[in-house]
Image (spheres, rainbow, N blue to C red):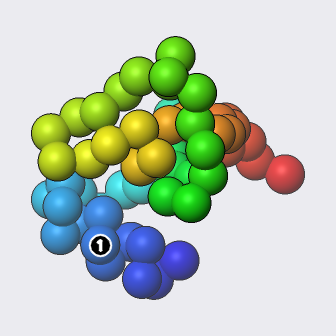
Amino acid sequence: MAEISKKFKEVFNDDDLHLEKRVVYIHGVPESMDLPDTIQGAVGKYDQHTTLPIAVGKIVEA
């Protein structure tokens, strides 16, 4: 957690992660994976292999 907190403060200038308000998005598949032409989503220099969302989750207190 210390590493995450440090990076969060560096990027967002805030110490409180507010985990109760966060969701997690995981993007990307290997470039070797064949994607159908219907997959869109190139953003800037990133192609569909990088931007393709593959999972999402909400952080909840256990």
- Determine the image quadrant of residue 43: top left
Q: Residue at x 31, y 77 (%)?
A: 6
Q: Is residue 36 visible?
A: yes
Query: Is residue 10 rendered to the left or right of residue 23?
Result: left
Residue identifier under label 1: 7
**Amino acid carrying mark 1 in the image:** Lys
Residue 50 position within the rendered picture, expressed as x and y whole percent measured from the top left: 41, 49
Q: Residue at x 29, y 33 (%)?
A: 42
- For the residue labelled by badge 1, is the local secondary structure a helix, a strand or a loop? helix
Q: Is residue 22 visible?
A: no
Residue 8 position within the rendered picture, expressed as x and y whole percent measured from the top left: 30, 64
Q: Is residue 37 above or below residue 23?
A: above
Query: Is residue 22 rendered to the left or right of residue 34?
Result: left
Residue 28 or 15: which is nearer the viewer? 28
Q: Is residue 1 above or below residue 17?
A: below
Query: Is residue 61 rendered to the left or right of residue 44?
Result: right
Q: Residue at x 19, y 54 (%)?
A: 12
Q: Residue at x 41, y 22 (%)?
A: 40
